[in-house]
Image (cartoon, rainbow, N blue to C red):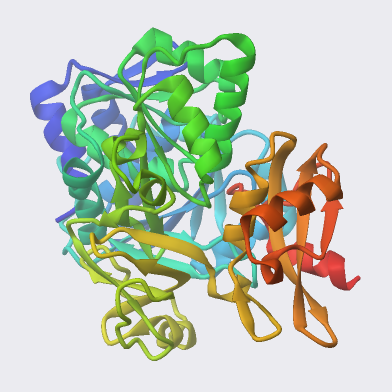
Amino acid sequence: MNIGHWLHRQAQVGGDRPALFLGSEQVATYAGFHNSAARLAGWLLAQGVSPGDRVALFMKNCPDYLITLFAIWYAGAAAVPINAKLHGREAAFVIDNAEAGLAFTSPGLTEGLGEAGTKARLIDVTSPIFAEALKVDPLPQPAIRAPDDLAWLFYTSGTTGKPKGVMITHRMLIGVSLAYFTDVDTASKDDSILYAAPMSHGAGLYAMLHVLVGARHVCPVSGGFDEREIFELARLFDRVQMFAAPTMVKRMTDVARATGESGRGLRTVVYAGGPMYVADITAAVEHFGPIFVQIYGQGECPMGITALPRHDVADRSHPRWRERLASVGRAQSTVEVRVGDAQGNPLPLGDVGEIMVRGDVVMPGYWQNDEANAKTLLDGWLMTGDMGFMDADGYVTLQDRSKDLIITGGSNVYPREVEEVLLTHPKVQEVSVVGRPHPDWGEEVVAFVVGEADAGELDELCIDSIARFKRPKDYICLTELPKNNYGKVLKTELRRRLSG
């Protein structure tokens, strides 16, 4: 089934409902949303776009993003959403690797793509061409697509090499959306989804389910993440759901504490995309209340591996609440999750190994990359590359990416365990722990720290909290940690600084 049918159906029964907003201004009802998508789809077909073709979106968050996304599906094509924070050359690589003949852009991004020399035809959504495209005869209904047809080609962040295209099918998008209702949260026509994180990523993957229920879609005027703007829009719309990276949650908490903002109107904040430290989420719940839900997924299994519901995030009565809060929750309804060794053999509960997942929301493979498929897909299981363990109740706790494991003197050190300790210091804002080559021990533990705590204080904290072999041998102060465009810390860059 074409996921675009959900918009078509909502327009039939709730066409007069408000759908798209830019800040506080309503841009379209569901009937208008559908009509624009259907007309743009008709224009795409007239330009020679055929079912299965790839069409790129290199745009900042805006209502036209959703119109264009659904138009691509209406036409039977596959969307290639690209993070608007990428450099033009990076975006051009994705477009050309996907063999996309068309790329929709927004002001300020078109020029960078043109300079990069992409082969695709560029269409700025503020241009007269786009305006004219919205006037052609609309398609009567979305194109027929099979469940396993490509719907979304998602490119990994590429922190260790060239990005790879993850093939996401219509079946996967439907599965992720329906699992939201069973494992993550409820949603209804009375709710609003606020797009403060890139729509090319997790935030956009939750658009479909909110279309299904007829909710409002709110794009901040800033086009991105601004704490005060989020709080203002939450008060205005009420019952707001949003997706946020852990770093965004921390920033929201810091700003709210400093300004006295209560977060009124925020109903649910789903967080994922990096390590959420216990100290940070505890502080967030203390200030905002039980509005947080954690999910764990990858581009290869988008938003769909595990979930830690709001009750578990906010509960402080369970004897093991800290351990559960440090976990990423239990397997979502559409998948099986287990912990295995390097060959994929299951490990006993409590043993650390690689997180493995299989089910209807796992990718069929990478785009034109058989070598990567052979390394990542094993007998139907996705080898996530994340290390962790599962307890007797099914809660999965991540340690680190397998490549981030530090082996010092023959003993394993998982950086996150050290990071959790260091973040309990009131003068530490951010921290990242990596391994540095050592002639005798193989590697030694090094901590990069953002904050005002001195090395002596941090060393004393570690001595009191963890085994001595896990204690950092060096503390390096930074004003900020290097991050990619999704807010993930670039540990490869930190290791490069150590070797330079």
Q: Quadrant of the C terminus?
A: bottom right
One can see residue 288 in this view: yes
Kindly identify the residue that appears in the image at 69 percent across and 40 percent down: 425
Kindly identify the residue that appears in the image at 14 percent across and 56 percent down: 1
Quadrant assignment, res 394: bottom left
Quadrant assignment, res 490: bottom right
Above or below, 486 against 51 in this view is: above
Above or below, 131 against 355 in this view is: above
Q: Residue furthest right?
A: 500
Q: Residue furthest left?
A: 13
372 on left or right of 78: right
x%, y% of residue 21? 39, 19
| Frontmost residue, 349 versus 276 | 349
| Frontmost residue, 168 versus 53 | 168
| Frontmost residue, 203 versus 262 | 262
One can see residue 124 in this view: no
x%, y% of residue 34? 24, 31
x%, y% of residue 75? 28, 51
190 on left or right of 227: left
93 on left or right of 283: right
Q: Residue furthest front?
A: 464
Kindly identify the residue that appears in the image at 82 percent across and 87 percent down: 440
Across the whole image, how many numbered discs are drawn on residues? 0
Kindly identify the residue that appears in the image at 33 percent across and 41 percent down: 206
